[in-house]
Image (spheres, grey):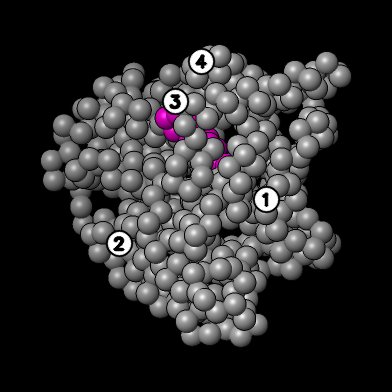
Amino acid sequence: MTYQECVDYILSIPLFAAKLGTENLNRILDKMGHPEDAYPVIHVAGTNGKGSTCLFLASILKQTGKRVGIFTSPHLVTINERIRIGDEIISDDAFVNTFQTTMRFVEEAQKDGIAHPSFFEFMFLMAAVYFKEKKVDYAIFETGMGGRLDATNVVKPKLCIITSIGMDHMQYLGNTLEEIAAEKAGIIKAGVPVLFFDRKDAATEIIREYSKKNRAKLYLIEKKQYKIKKITNKSIDFSFDSGYYRYCNLQIRKTGLYQIENAILAVKAFEILTNSFDLDCKDNTKDYNRVTYRSVGLLEDSVREGLFRMIWHGRMEKIAENVYLDGAHNEEAIEAFCNTVEVLFPTEQKKLLFAVSKDKDYARMIEILGRIPFEEIILVRYEGDRAESLDKVEALFRRFSGSKITTFDDIETGFLYGKSHVEDSCLFCVGSLYLAGDLLSLGV
């Protein structure tokens, strides 16, 4: 099969399995010899920040000389983005080879009456196979949506990370924060450390409860543990007190302020994984029972370099002069986006390019956006059944905002209009990962 034939086949597979749970997937993995057990795994769940946390952690580990496989979703431009090792996404040739290997086992399983995996299960199987073939030192698997019933929940992790819990995918995960938290907490395994960003809401108690029930050591990170020191045109400088070590001079590239929280989760995860500095950080000292100034320095260097080198497209990314793209697509992410705009762009005139999916709580998203005095709001619609109609979106913006509103039936025309009218203001493109993917695929 050609690369495009492989992609077309995968995209034709139903998104969800006919039967919820991991039983069917485990039966296929039995036939494959469980490739997901061939390397230490970090399992990451959460409403927002999963992908960024995965890439921050992988970037830090890379600085210590480790090869790290990363499985994330969704993709923005090409399906290959879901499977990568370090900074390199899987090549088209490797994608075809991995597809064919996976397909042979799927066909063998079908002969024994085992159902064909769903789209997400198939991609997970490909990632597991690819990471084993490439002999990675670690693999980081991001859940697709929830946790308890997610395909990735077949892994036996060394560390579980839950980044955030907010109101999203309610039709599948529940209508309260507690219900959604319970689904995310489904990744917690007996005796496996858990890392969670504590936002002092009802979700924390659910995570505590599940951790205690599984006798899993819980590490909580709080907002008070970091402090922004300086914001420049290129970076956000901050300090972080991990509870074990104080990092005084950390930097991430200038992006959304919310990325600091994802970064410090990655830093703490790195500390947990090192298990008192038992990672080989290019230090000749092998007596890791004795923490040396040299080993501490090398670890901090790895953290600092890893954080600053990480790039995650579509997250408050500057895609043109005075034009920024952010994939915020739910209430929690829109709140974080607005906080970033208010802090980093306090005096600039602002314009908004917005598209949204009909299955989101977009009324609440638009209400939050209404607090930003946009000079103009440009509404566009991406192709596909999930996109909400312009009329409904416009009506809500007129309710919550007094800004001028302009509408376009397609993304490219709306973006070109917005870009040509930016002048000295800033244009922010937000509301949907479909919007982000379409804009990046246009080569903007």
Q: Nearer the viewer, mark 3 or mark 1?
A: 1
Q: CA distance from mark 2 to mark 4?
A: 42 Å
Q: Secondary structure at mark 4?
A: loop
What residue lies at 61% left-to-right and 25% top-to-bottom?
99
**Few, some or many residues within 10 Å of mark 1 (<14, 14–19, 20+):** many
Magenta region includes residue 72: yes
Looking at numbered disc 4 in the image, what kind of residue is underneath it?
Answer: Thr
- Distance (Cα) linking label 1 and label 4: 30 Å
Q: Which residue is under mark 3?
A: 392
Crowding at dot 4, Cα within 10 Å, few <14 / some 14-19 / many 20+, comes out as few
**Can residue 216 be seen at all in this image of the molecule?**
yes
Q: Quadrant of residue 419?
A: top left
Which quarter of the picture shows residue 29? top right
Marks 1 and 4, the one that precedes in the sequence: 4
255 part of magenta stretch:
no
Give x and y (percent) for residue 410. 33, 20
> Residue 389, located in which quarter of the rendered image?
top left
277, above or below 440, in the image? below
Is 168 left or right of 402, judged from the image as shown? right
Residue at 53% x, 20% y is 7
Q: Give the residue type that dot 1 points to.
A: Tyr
* Sequence-wise first label, 2 or 4: 4
Name the kind of residue labelled 3 in the image: Lys
Name the residue tied to disc 4. 2
Could you tell me which residue is drawn at 30 percent across and 62 percent down? 235
Other-residue count near label 2 (Cα within 10 Å), few / some / many at <14 / 14–19 / ≥20: some
